[in-house]
Image (spheres, grey):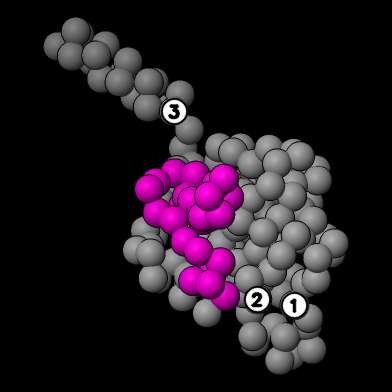
Amino acid sequence: MKRIITVLAALLLAGCAADPIVAHYPQYDKESLVKEASAIVAVKVVSVRDSMLEPDYSDPTLDPRDNPDDPKASGVPVHVFTVEVIKPFKWDRKTVAEGGKSPSPGDRTEVREEGQHTLQVGQSYVLFLETYPDSPASILGGNQGIFIRTDDGKIKSATSDESYTEEELSK
């Protein structure tokens, strides 16, 4: 009995050592990634800073006093990248219709990334983004929305074999 309790305690402690916040992102096929992205832009990463993504406490289900163990009820560490737009392929029409503007080459905007820091300062990417009115954009599908240009002019996923042409992104 003492041995079972020791093994259970060791397993519990091992579980506590793991990162309790694990993001689960939806997966997109080639067509839905383009369709669901509110923005697709070629960018160059200018700088990065660490930040916290705070929950919207106007949602009563996220009150940490009601469920202090819910990771959604507390801040989530994120990296916020300042990026310079090289070329916008797609930008949220609703944002533009409400008086916002599609970015132009040279404009700067912010993009956040949860979890593993994969974007590198000084590097260029094509990002599939979800935009928000008062928060940095997020990369769609986690790292699934990170692409690079290849020497043959294709835009290839940084995490899979998916690739696009510029024409496919501008639809």
User: Can you tell which mark lies on residue 102?
Assistant: 1
Residue 146 % position (x, y): 54, 51
* Numbered range of the magenta stretch: 143-170
In the image, what residue occupies the spot 44% across and 66% down? 33
Q: Position of residue 133 (x, y in %)?
A: 71, 75
Residue type pointed to by label 3: Ala
Q: Amino acid at mark 2?
A: Trp
User: In the rendered view, does 28 fall on the left or right side of 68?
Assistant: left
Label whose residue precedes the other's in the sequence (3 or 2): 3
Say the numbered circle drawn on residue 91.
2
Crowding near the residue tagged with mark 2, few <14, some 14–19, many ≥20 C-alpha atoms within 10 Å: many
- Residue at x 37% of width, y 21% of height: 14
Which percent across, then down, holds residue 166? 56, 66
Q: Which mark is residue 18?
A: 3
Asked if the residues shown at circle 1 and circle 2 are in contact, with their CB atoms under 8 angstroms apart, the answer is yes
Task: Assign a secondary structure to mark 3.
Answer: loop
Q: Residue furthest top?
A: 3
Crowding at label 3, few (<14), some or many (≥20) Cα neighbours within 10 Å? few
Residue drawn at x 79%, y 89% is: 99
At x 79%, y 56%, the residue is: 84
Residue 31 picture quarter: bottom left
Where is residue 4 shown, x and y percent of the image?
A: 18, 14
